Image (tube, grey):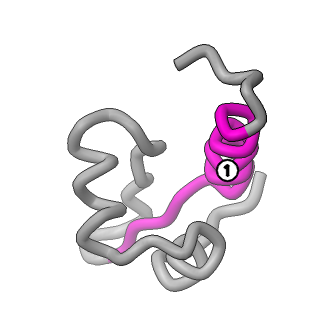
Amino acid sequence: MKFIRLRTVLEMTALSSTTLYRLIETGKFPQNVALGERCVAWVEEEVEDWLAQRIAERDGGGTN
C-alpha cells in the first residue's frame, strides 16, 4: 500500500482542492487518512480505482 499527498492527488485527478474536498464531503471521493496531527494522505489504489470508475462511466460501463 502506498500513501500519496494532496499535491499528487490533485495532479492525478486534475481537480481543484475545493472540488476534491467537496467530493469527499459528499462521499463521492475516497476519504483521506490522518498520518499525524497536521498530515493527511490518500491510499493511491483508492484514488486510481476512483479514476478508473470515472473512465468506465464515460464509456457506458458505470453503474451510476
Q: Which of 15 and 59 is in front in this view?
A: 59
- Image-based side of 63 in relation to 6, left or right: right
Is residue 30 depicted above or below 42 in this figure?
above
Please give the range of residues in magenta: 39-58
Number of dots carrying numbers: 1
Dominant SS type (magenta)? helix
Direction top: furthest residue: 63
- Image-based side of 19 in relation to 32, left or right: left
- Residue at x 54%, y 75% (from the top left corner): 14
Percent of width and height locating residue 24: 32, 47
Q: Nearer the viewer, residue 63 or 33?
A: 63
Percent of width and height locating residue 53: 68, 36
Is residue 31 depicted above or below 57 in this figure?
below
- Residue at x 76%, y 22% (from the top left corner): 61
Q: Which of 30 and 3 is in front in this view?
A: 30
Is residue 57 depicted above or below 63 in this figure?
below
Tell me the residue that label 1 is attached to.
Answer: 51
Q: Which amino acid does label 1 sit on?
A: Leu
Percent of width and height locating residue 57: 66, 33
Q: What element carries label 1?
A: helix
Q: Is residue 57 magenta?
A: yes
- Residue at x 36%, y 77% (from the top left corner): 16
Percent of width and height locating residue 38: 27, 76
Q: Judge the density around disc 1: few (<14), some (14-19), many (≥20) Cα neighbours within 10 Å.
A: some
Q: Does the magenta stretch include residue 54?
A: yes
